[in-house]
Image: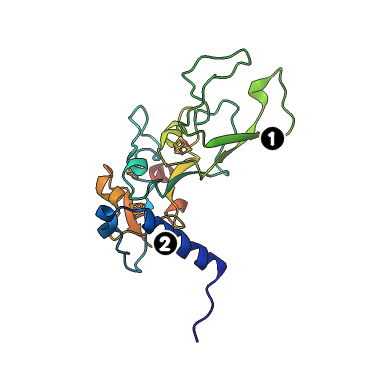
Amino acid sequence: MKSEPTRREFLNATARGAGLVALGSTAAYLVIKAGPDGYWQVDPRKCINIRLGAVNVEVCDKCATTCVLPLSAVRAVNEYAKCGRCCICPSYFDVTSEIGRDGLPTRKLCPRDAITREAIGDVDPDDPLNNFYDYHIDEDKCDGCGKCVMACKEPAGLGSLRLEVRHSLCVDCNRCTIATACPDDALVRNTNDLSKMDPHPEEETA
Ligand code: SF4
Ligand code: SF4
Ligand code: SF4
């Protein structure tokens, strides 16, 4: 006897249906559902925005601009275990902007205002650099443009931000259009959890 779908399965099916309806007919052939062999994911060892060591290079925006969905299925994710909770986070602030009276940059980096922060403990106004924050991504706003991910690298960042295909949003195209556009071959079809992979594996073995 066929069992009732779980709430999660129901929501996933609804999200996929909504995504398909939103697609134009020209893109429809791409979203013939791929086989049950895995799922599309960003390989953090290849993506130029994620991999450590790739600094002073242009941000790649293809995850945001080439997905078949109106708002890409790719999102920035903060791995809290790695995050330094810095007061002047280079992914939260545009560190090239003018410094205000409070000693902090006056502009934010995210073009969609998708990053918020929450102070940890009491804030000392006389010593702003000694305050620490939790940084959160609003996934309803983020489009995976990668700017914050690129900024969270050495020497200022710790590489805690990365990009991920959100499987609750992805319609699992037979041929992912981001994979076709990706200059690093970093959008791959995989059965493993790539989010657990270190973007700089050479460091581990050194
Ligand atoms: S990936 Fe782009 S849109 Fe998303 S939080 Fe980072 S800067 Fe903002
Ligand atoms: S398979 Fe690729 S292009 Fe299709 S919805 Fe998923 S991330 Fe977007
Ligand atoms: S298209 Fe490729 S290189 Fe560009 S952000 Fe996406 S995964 Fe990274």
Q: Amino acid at mark 1?
A: Ile
Q: Amino acid at mark 2?
A: Gly
In this rendering, the answer to whether 101 lies above or below 95 is: above
First in sequence: mark 1 vs mark 2: 2
Residue 195 position, x and y percent, is 45, 52
Coloration of the structure image: rainbow
Residue 1 position, x and y percent, is 50, 87
Query: Which residue is depicted at the point 51% across and 22% down?
Result: 107
Question: Front-most of 69 and 52?
Answer: 69
Quarter of the picture holding the C terminus: top left
Instruction: Name the outermost residue toward the top.
Output: 101
Label 2: which residue? 17
Using a 10 Å C-alpha cutoff, classify the residue at mark 1 as few (fewer than 14 neighbours), some (14 to 19) or many (20 or more): few
Query: In the rendered image, which quarter is residue 193 located in?
Result: bottom left
In this rendering, the answer to whether 174 lies above or below 182 is: below
Q: Secondary structure at mark 2?
A: helix
In this rendering, the answer to whether 152 lies above or below 15 is: above
Question: Position of 26 compared to 78: left or right?
Answer: left
CB within 8 Å, label 1 to label 2:
no
Q: Secondary structure at mark 1?
A: loop
Q: Is residue 1 something one can see in this rendering?
A: yes
Label 1: which residue? 120
Query: Which residue is depicted at the point 60% across and 27% down?
Result: 87
Gap in angstroms between the C-alphas marked 1 and 2: 40 Å
